[in-house]
């Protein structure tokens, strides 16, 4: 499955160590295969959050953000 990320917004988040990180929210898009040969992308309903250095972050319901240890491959 081909995916593409579309930037929705960015915001600053302060960590418990006092550092401020820039967080980027992306909407995950998937290729629409219904039109052969067409370059058409549709929203998947999923959002991904990354730091500006590419590391993936998890955003929990209480607003806590957990940073993954290593940068994720960029698809944008």
Image (cartoon, helix red, strand yellow):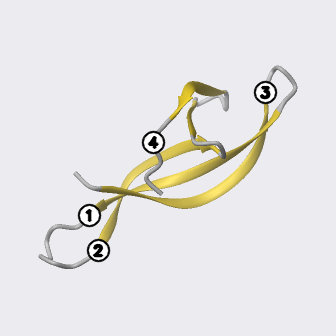
Q: Position of residue 2 (x, y in %)?
A: 27, 55
Q: Position of residue 55 (x, y in %)?
A: 58, 36
Q: Residues within 10 Å of mark 4 (few under 14, many from 20)?
A: few
**Compared with residue 48, is residue 66 higher up or lower down, i.e. above or below?**
above
Circles 2, 1 touching at the beta carbon (< 8 Å)? yes
Q: Secondary structure at mark 4?
A: loop
- The mark that comes first in sequence, 3 or 1, is 3
Question: Is label 1 in a helix, a strand or a loop?
Answer: strand
- Mark 2, other Cα within 10 Å: few <14 / some 14–19 / many ≥20: few
In the image, residue 43 sits, relative to residue 58, either above or below, namely below
Give the distance between the C-alpha atoms of the residues marked 3 and 1, in whole angstroms.
35 Å
18 w.r.t. 56: above or below: above
* Mark 4 vs 1: CB contact within 8 A: no
Mark 4 to mark 3 CA distance (whole Å):
23 Å
- Using the image, tell me which numbered label, if any, was put on residue 31: 1
Q: Rate crowding at label 3 as few (under 14), some (14 to 19) or many (20 or more) other CA atoms within 10 Å.
A: few
Q: Which residue is found at the position 81% from the left and 21% from the top?
A: 16
Q: Which mark is residue 4?
A: none
Residue position for label 4: 73
Residue for badge 2: 40
Residue 39 place in picture, x, y as percent = 27, 76
Find residue 69 and report its image quarter. Answer: top right
Question: Alpha carbon of mark 4 to alpha carbon of mark 2: how far?
Answer: 22 Å
Q: Is residue 59 left or right of residue 3?
A: right
Q: Nearer the viewer, residue 65 or 2?
A: 2
The 10 Å Cα crowd at callout 1, few under 14, some 14 to 19, many 20 or more, is some
Question: Residue 20's quadrant in the figure?
Answer: top right
Judging by the rendered image, the residue that carries numbered circle 3 is 15
């Amino acid at each position: 499955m081909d995916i593409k990320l579309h930037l929705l917004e960015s915001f600053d988040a302060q960590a418990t160590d006092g550092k401020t990180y820039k967080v980027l929210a992306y909407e995950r898009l998937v290729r629409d295969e219904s039109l052969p040969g067409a370059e058409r992308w549709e929203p998947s309903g999923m959002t991904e959050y990354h730091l500006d250095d590419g590391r993936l972050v998890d955003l929990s319901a209480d607003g806590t953000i957990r940073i993954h240890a290593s940068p994720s491959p960029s698809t944008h």
